[in-house]
């Protein structure tokens, strides 16, 4: 049996506080607020009165807690269109201190408001009178400590952030992330990710605008963050479908001691491959291959140096453009060995279990048909064995950019300039 | 460019950068003076860094002359340029005293790179534009020789070169530096995927040009605070006395890069 507690003409109502507000440690009584937004750009917040102890079965009524003008009409001079002040959506932020915060948006501009209460004021100043005027010092005969006395509740609302110019089309939803740091806003064709503290830029995370607007058949109608997983969000489309998105970012922090003008270029990833198990990702950058665990975004779980002897030659390699070469990488069928190409028609394999690696060559001279490939070595000065290649005599025009490993057997395909080589592991032809 | 010379120079650069940068990092916590002292201890670090800047700018120009520039490569090179510029700003070598004492050898070097920078239109007009800057006050004649060998040498010189030989005084270096920074930022902005703004509606038919440098530069710029053409054109014609030698020359390089991008 529902009874009416309040009624008003509203266009946008945010009930998240109503539903989710739990007794906080700050106040002893449950504090329930309902925020509403109307066509005139006003936000009205209702507060539920505490239940009366005398009549425990009477629910507390909702009364107006605060009213403020959130948005005003604007004019877009570029398009000669008026931007309505009508409030499209409101979202409360999770409460982190005594103040409340909410986001309100019209078609274009998103605003963050802070709502604070004041129910006490200090009285008994020594130098000021009740009205705040300075006292005549000769009348002061004794000193007193100002005390806080209750006053009528005053609710103050202040704008804290204004995020404008983020949307070409009309905003239809905003959603705050469970990380309490970011939020997203969706219009008909795009979804942007914002940081609550930064208003002058946002990241575009979804875009469904076709190259030709005449081909437009679908628009975004709503979007929301997952309540617990801060990397997941969902958006709906006008065709009735839902799309779940994962925003996880895998990034290794840069080592400041190794920083050079070439750091960014050599960290650029040229290839990424999921492991067959789906648990790992393999990335290739200029000097290393790295294994990432899907469950760990902060750094790779394994890093292998592919040709570290080139680290001192980066400027030369920048000059001859070799530093921009994009090498691929590959897993074997059981995800125990990873492979990638290098220069001089060499390619490298790394065994993740034994931590051993080998360098092999793909060329007609070095491998007769059915002959076993001999391991090669690049020497960096110091002791040089027979058949070693010195770094300075590497042929940088002979690069093995493309390599592939058979999904189940130990057969590999190597592309070296104009030639394709296929090798097989005779001893261990099955995966293990 | 002689291959051997180029190789020698870049081999030097390799060792310089490995040593010089580690030392710089070590000195990074100290004040500017300490850092400069550290750099001076490797006398040609600044010159080598300048070489890297020159090399990068040439690469940028050349790659945009291709029909289909490799966007990844362009972005990485452009970021390298920005990094160098930021470091130069931090250690104070950005602010240069005038280097007119270098004499004829330096002018030749400037002229030879100048020709590389000019668009054909400007060469026809005989418009003078300064070439790569001589940032480095440690700049010496023989080192100039090394560098000039790496650039194509041109014997004919346009008449207005005299303007270039004027005393280029530092006027308001902070402002010029700021404008250079803004111009560079605007170039880089086009290479980043920023969130769309209302200008895009005007180009809604050709939105895939978002990834096309040419259209990005011509289309997006009109909505930024300072139109890049405005900013760069301010510095494109040298005035007699109120011109900033080295910041301006880099601005003119950008000017050329932008022009090449727009015209291609």
Image: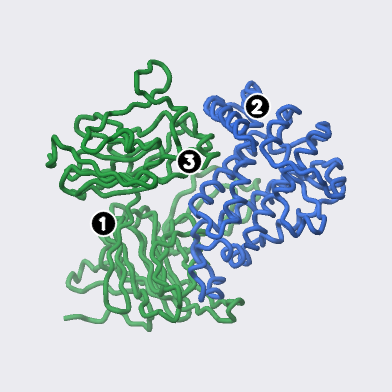
Chain colours: A green, B blue
Q: Nearer the viewer, residue A136 or A262?
A: A262
Identify the residue at horizontal 55%, vertical 81% (top origin): A82
Q: Position of residue B133 (x, y in %)?
A: 72, 41
Q: Position of residue A265 (x, y in %)?
A: 47, 42
Q: Quadrant of the C terminus of chain A?
A: top left
* Mark 2 burial class by Cα count in 10 Å: few <14, some 14-19, many 20+: many
Q: Nearer the viewer, residue B260 or A279?
A: B260
The residue under label 2 is B44
SS for tag 3? Answer: helix
* Mark 1 burial class by Cα count in 10 Å: few <14, some 14-19, many 20+: few
Q: Position of residue A135 (x, y in %)?
A: 63, 51
Q: Is residue B112 above or below residue A395?
A: below
Q: Position of residue A290 (x, y in %)?
A: 32, 39
Q: Is residue A277 above or below residue A237?
A: above
| Displayed quadrant of residue B24 | top right
Give the foreground label among 2 and 1. Answer: 2
Q: Residue A296, can we see it? A: no
What separation in Å lies between label 1 and label 3 (alpha carbons)? 45 Å
Numbered label attached to residue A228: 1
| Displayed quadrant of residue B259 | bottom right
Same-chain status of marks 2 and 3: no
- Horizontal side of A327 relative to A126 (left or right) equals left
Q: Nearer the viewer, residue A410 or A10?
A: A410
- Horizontal side of B205 relative to B242 (left or right) equals left
What separation in Å lies between label 2 and label 3 (alpha carbons)? 25 Å
What separation in Å lies between label 2 and label 1 (alpha carbons)? 56 Å
Q: Is residue A193 above or below residue A402?
A: below
Same-chain status of marks 2 and 1: no
* Mark 3 burial class by Cα count in 10 Å: few <14, some 14-19, many 20+: some
Q: How many marks?
A: 3
The residue under label 3 is A322
């Amino acid at each position: 049996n529902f009874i009416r507690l309040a009624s008003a003409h509203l266009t946008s109502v945010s009930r998240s506080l109503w539903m989710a507000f739990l007794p906080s440690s700050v106040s002893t009584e449950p504090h329930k607020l309902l925020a509403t937004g109307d066509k005139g750009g006003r936000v009205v917040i209702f507060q539920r009165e505490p239940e009366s102890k005398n009549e425990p079965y009477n629910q507390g009524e909702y009364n107006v807690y605060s009213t403020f003008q959130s948005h005003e009409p604007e004019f877009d001079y570029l398009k000669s269109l008026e931007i309505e002040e009508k409030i499209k959506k409101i979202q409360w932020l999770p409460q982190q201190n005594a103040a409340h915060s909410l986001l309100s948006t019209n078609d274009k501009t998103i605003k963050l408001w802070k709502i604070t209460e004041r129910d006490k004021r200090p009285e008994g100043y020594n130098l000021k009178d009740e009205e705040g005027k300075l006292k005549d010092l000769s009348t002061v005969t004794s000193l007193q400590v100002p005390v806080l006395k209750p006053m009528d509740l005053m609710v103050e609302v202040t704008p804290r952030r204004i995020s404008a110019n983020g949307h070409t089309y009309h905003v239809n939803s905003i959603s705050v992330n469970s990380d309490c740091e970011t939020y997203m806003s969706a219009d008909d064709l795009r979804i942007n990710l914002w940081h609550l503290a930064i208003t002058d830029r946002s990241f575009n995370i979804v875009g469904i605008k076709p190259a030709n607007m005449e081909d437009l058949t679908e628009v975004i109608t709503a979007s929301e963050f997952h309540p617990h997983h801060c990397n997941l969000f969902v958006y709906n489309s006008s065709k009735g479908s839902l799309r779940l998105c994962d925003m996880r970012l895998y990034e290794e922090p840069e080592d400041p001691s190794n920083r050079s003008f070439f750091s960014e270029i050599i960290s650029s990833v040229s290839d990424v491959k999921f492991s067959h198990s789906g648990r790992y990702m393999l990335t290739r950058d200029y000097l290393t291959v790295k294994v990432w665990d899907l469950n760990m975004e902060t750094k790779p779980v394994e890093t292998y140096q592919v040709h570290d002897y080139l680290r001192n030659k980066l400027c030369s390699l920048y000059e001859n453009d070799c530093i921009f070469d994009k090498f691929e990488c590959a897993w074997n069928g059981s995800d125990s060995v990873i492979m990638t190409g290098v220069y001089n028609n060499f390619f490298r394999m790394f065994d993740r279990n034994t931590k051993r690696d080998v360098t092999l060559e793909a060329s007609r001279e070095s491998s007769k048909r059915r002959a076993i490939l001999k391991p090669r070595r690049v020497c960096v000065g110091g002791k040089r064995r027979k058949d070693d290649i010195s770094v300075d005599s590497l042929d940088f025009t002979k690069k093995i950019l493309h390599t592939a490993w058979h999904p189940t057997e130990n057969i590999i395909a190597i592309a070296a300039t104009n030639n394709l080589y296929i090798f097989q592991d005779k001893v261990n032809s099955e995966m293990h | 460019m002689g291959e051997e010379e180029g190789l020698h120079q870049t081999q030097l650069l390799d060792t310089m950068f490995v040593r010089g940068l580690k030392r710089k990092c070590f000195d990074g916590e100290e004040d500017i003076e300490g850092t400069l002292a550290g750099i001076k201890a490797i006398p040609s670090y600044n010159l080598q860094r300048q070489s890297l800047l020159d090399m990068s700018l040439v690469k940028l120009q050349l790659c945009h002359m291709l029909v289909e520039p490799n966007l990844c490569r362009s972005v990485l090179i452009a970021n390298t340029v920005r990094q160098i510029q930021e470091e130069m700003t931090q250690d104070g070598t950005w602010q240069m005293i005038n280097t007119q004492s270098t004499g004829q050898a330096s002018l030749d070097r400037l002229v030879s790179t100048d020709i590389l920078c000019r668009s054909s239109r400007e060469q026809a007009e005989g418009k003078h534009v300064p070439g790569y800057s001589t940032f480095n006050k440690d700049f010496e004649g023989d080192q100039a020789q090394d560098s000039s060998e790496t650039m194509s040498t041109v014997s004919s010189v346009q008449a207005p070169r005299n303007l270039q030989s004027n005393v280029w005084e530092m006027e308001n270096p902070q402002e010029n530096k700021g404008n250079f920074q803004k111009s560079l930022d605007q170039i880089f902005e086009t290479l980043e995927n920023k969130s769309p703004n209302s200008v895009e509606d005007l180009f809604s038919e050709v939105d895939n040009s978002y990834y096309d440098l040419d259209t990005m530069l011509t289309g997006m710029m009109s909505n930024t605070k300072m139109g890049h053409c405005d900013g760069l054109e301010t510095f494109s014609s040298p005035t007699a006395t109120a011109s900033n030698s080295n910041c301006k020359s880099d601005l003119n390089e950008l000017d050329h890069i932008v022009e090449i991008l727009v015209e291609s």
